[in-house]
Amino acid sequence: MPRFWVHTFGCQMNVHDSERMESVLQSQGFVAAESVEAADLVVFNTCSVRERAEQKLRSEVGKLKPLKRERPELVICVAGCVAQQEGERLLQQIPHVDLVVGPDNIPELPGLVLDQMAGSPPVARATFDVAAPRFLAVAPAPGQAPASAYVTTMKGCDERCSFCVVPYTRGPERYRPHEEIVGEIAALVAAGTREVVLLGQTVDSFRDPGLPPPESDDPDESQFPHLLRAIAARVPALARLRYTSPHPRHATASLARAHAELDVLARHVHMPVQSGSDRVLRRMIRRYTRAEYIERVRRLQAARAGLTLSTDIIVGFPGETRAEADETLSLVREVGFVSLFGFKYSPRPHTPALKLADDVPEEEKSERLARLFEVGEEMTRAHLAPLVGTRQTVLLEGASKGGDGPGGGVSHQGRTERNEIVHVELPRGVAGAGAIVTVEVTAAFRHSLAGVIDPVSLSGLPRRPAAAPRRSLPVVGSEGP
Ligand code: SF4
């Protein structure tokens, strides 16, 4: 049986795509290798959102050159966004690469690999499935469903933000029929999943003729709120529902109503803002102003008491002045984000922003990023510290890396419905993954909490050998659009 190894770079979408690759490979008789050296197939699932991720890919693929020289039958595949962006060129640029497979060509992966193993010449397959979009579901083995699972609802993006290569690498928006989404969620929940995270580049732009029409003529309205309602109604055993990443444009009044109606929706939304300056937002082609963004997130917060927000921000966009960077810092404070992801702008191929001069010096970008992180950490601390002494409902996701807790038990990680990470310790022989427990918070760290499981919750947990920790794929980098 051929053995595979998958390296993942980039965002949650790529992590999820890697799971789909594993799934299609396994369905054709491939098995996971214990190490890259033991593999017959190595797949690099790549990210081109930032220049650094692309450079990292080229360096990681380069490291396999000696192994390929030693074992010419080893198949090296580059998949994901760089594969889509570069296509055939990659085969010329990195001659020890055998296969280039775009995100929409994952279903063809096993066949293409077997062809390579049978001696076919190197090949690039990177075409969008615009006419007949395919969405592969990850099928959990009985009892192996993760506590929290991603479910794809759409792919591609029609927004064309001026800094972003995703519309080029992932193609136009295509939506998965809601029946398929509901079916996959029902199967996951039946297999033990408690939380689902709906995944899409602009997850809240969802459309499906099979759902009722949007609730108003507002062009920003979508049928996403109807999708949320359909999931809540038809999979009542689902404990928590999240979504990522929404575009602020579609955070309409009807989405706020869904948050008010549906208890299953988590009280946390990750809503990328990118900048707090109207001039920069306009040049980024984000299609909202600072005031509109604030109005939209306030509406969500008004719909659901205690709803928290996190965000993505780019610093050093072409032409961004120091005063405009300061406007972003003031927005972070004004909105009160409980966490944020910050990135330095880097020019990407095929993006409209290439026409603008990348004129913020690298040192200045680093300085702006450092100031952003300082403010972000201050906000996170101010949010987490008052939670010490409170009781929180926590979904346990599985054993933490390292496993052993200071009290002789096993360390587990979980999340509250507001997405705060909580570390707890379970006695040995107690199964934790997938359980929802009450935790008394005893300490706050930089980005997480620690606590003690309430004795009543603890006594309700099954006394059997601990479930396997949540399956995690090797992930390189953590950047997203
Ligand atoms: S940043 Fe997001 S919304 Fe904008 S083009 Fe990229 S994927 Fe689309």
Image (tube, rainbow, N blue to C red):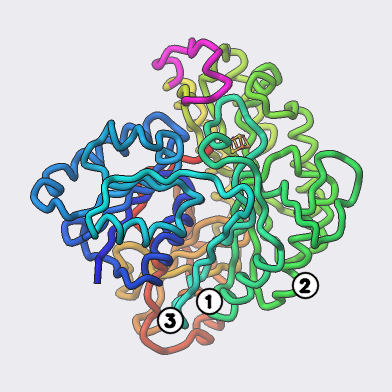
- Look at the picture and state if 289 lies above or below 152: above
Q: Is residue 127 visible?
A: yes
Residue 106: where, in percent of width, then height?
Answer: 45, 55
Q: CA distance from mark 2 to mark 1?
A: 22 Å
Query: Marks 3 and 1: in contact by CB < 8 Å?
Result: yes
Q: CA distance from mark 3 to mark 2?
A: 29 Å
Judge from the rendering whether residue 343 lies leftward or rightward of residue 41; answer left or right.
right
Query: Any mark on residue 233, and which?
Result: 2
The quarter holding residue 287 reads top right
Q: Element type at marker 3?
A: loop
Q: Earlier in the sequence, mark 3 or mark 2?
A: 2
- Look at the picture and state if 251 lies above or below 39: above
- Is residue 445 inside the magenta stretch? no
The quarter holding residue 425 reads bottom left
Residue 236: where, in percent of width, then height?
Answer: 72, 76
Judge from the rendering whether residue 437 lies leftward or rightward of residue 117; answer left or right.
right
Q: Nearer the viewer, mark 2 or mark 1?
A: 2
- Residue beneath the point at 37% across and 70% down: 28
Q: Nearer the viewer, residue 183 or 171?
A: 171
Q: Element type at marker 1?
A: loop
Query: Any mark on residue 435, and which?
Result: 1
- Look at the picture and state if 25 lies above or below 303: below
Q: Element type at marker 2?
A: helix
Q: CA distance from mark 1 to mark 3?
A: 8 Å
- Is residue 363 inside the magenta stretch? yes
Three-letter amino acid code at the position of disc 2: Ala
Q: Earlier in the sequence, mark 2 or mark 1?
A: 2
